């Protein structure tokens, strides 16, 4: 089964909680709470409510950046960007019972995270995206293929989740690169009906999974 991760985003139309609620209603079972410009008090307030929503749906709940909040809010784990705490330090603090994800843009990033004990990689950006500042170099399809090739050559077996400006139309070609899943935000929230768009995305991912299985 392939992974679809939803990353919360704030728009003129939707709050962070609104975005997560719609993703969950659409069937997504992996939510990452990302509130880059918010203060700790606001993050904790939203996180506590989102923790309950994820519990009700049986969804995995990951918080972005804030290792120190994982236990406090009862998250399942943390996702660390390239400028955040190191995976090795987070693993030392949290132990083995929590999920730790790391952002990667190159094979070297992937290998370092793997050595440090990461559980999965958020790899990107696939293309330019307006939901993230200070973008790393764009990977595109060939970038993913090359990273997967190098991982296989060195027997590095880690879930690789493609991220960064991915739309519904990109799903078949992105999944064919060998990645394990995709992470989305803007393409869901820009849809006329975000709940239905999430359902459509999950169906498309499952179809690529079934196609591989039936080959």
Image: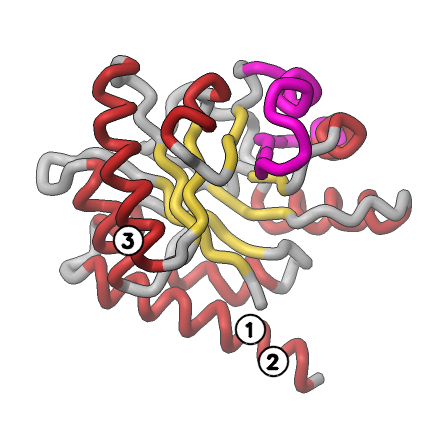
Magenta residue check for 40: no
Q: Verify whether residue 106 appears in magenta.
A: yes
Q: Residues within 10 Å of mark 3 (few under 14, many from 20)?
A: many
Can you say whether 200 is above or below 10 in the image? below
Q: What's the distance in space between the residues labelled 3 and 1, CA to CA?
A: 19 Å
Q: What residue is shown with label 3?
A: 188
How busy is the neighbourhood of tag 2: few (under 14 within 10 Å), some, or many (20 plus)? few
Residue at 35% from the left image edge and 35% from the top image edge: 33
Q: Which residue is mark 2?
A: 211
**Quadrant the C terminus occupies:** bottom right
Number of residues whose C-alpha sits closer than 10 Å to that of mark 1, classed few (under 14), some (14–19) or many (20 or more): some
Q: Secondary structure at mark 3?
A: helix
Residue at numbered disc 1 = 208
What segment is highlighted magenta in the picture? 85-109
Q: Are marks 3 and 2 in contact (CB under 8 Å)?
A: no
Q: Are marks 1 and 2 in contact (CB under 8 Å)?
A: yes
Tell me which residue sits at (23%, 45%) in the image.
Answer: 19
Q: Position of residue 146 (x, y in %)?
A: 75, 45
Percent position (x, y) of residue 174?
56, 57
Q: Secondary structure at mark 2?
A: helix
């Amino acid at each position: 089964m392939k992974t679809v991760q939803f990353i919360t985003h704030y728009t003129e139309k939707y709050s962070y909680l609104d975005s997560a609620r719609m993703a969950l209603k659409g069937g997504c079972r992996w939510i990452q709470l990302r509130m880059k410009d918010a203060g700790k008090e606001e993050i904790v307030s939203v996180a506590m409510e989102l923790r309950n929503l994820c519990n009700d749906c049986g969804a995995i709940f990951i918080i972005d950046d804030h290792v120190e909040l994982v236990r406090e809010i009862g998250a399942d784990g943390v996702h660390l960007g390239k400028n955040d705490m190191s995976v090795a330090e987070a693993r030392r603090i949290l132990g083995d019972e929590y999920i730790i994800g790391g952002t990667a843009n190159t094979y070297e990033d992937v290998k370092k995270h793997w050595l440090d004990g990461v559980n999965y990689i958020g790899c990107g950006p696939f293309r330019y995206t307006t939901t993230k500042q200070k973008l790393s170099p764009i990977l595109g399809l060939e970038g993913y293929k090359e990273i997967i090739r190098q991982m296989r050559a060195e027997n590095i077996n880690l879930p690789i989740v493609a991220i960064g400006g991915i739309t519904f139309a990109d799903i078949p070609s992105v999944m064919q690169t060998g990645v394990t899943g995709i992470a989305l935000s803007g393409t869901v929230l820009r849809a006329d009906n975000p709940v239905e768009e999430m359902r459509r995305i999950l169906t498309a991912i499952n179809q690529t999974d079934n196609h591989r299985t039936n080959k």
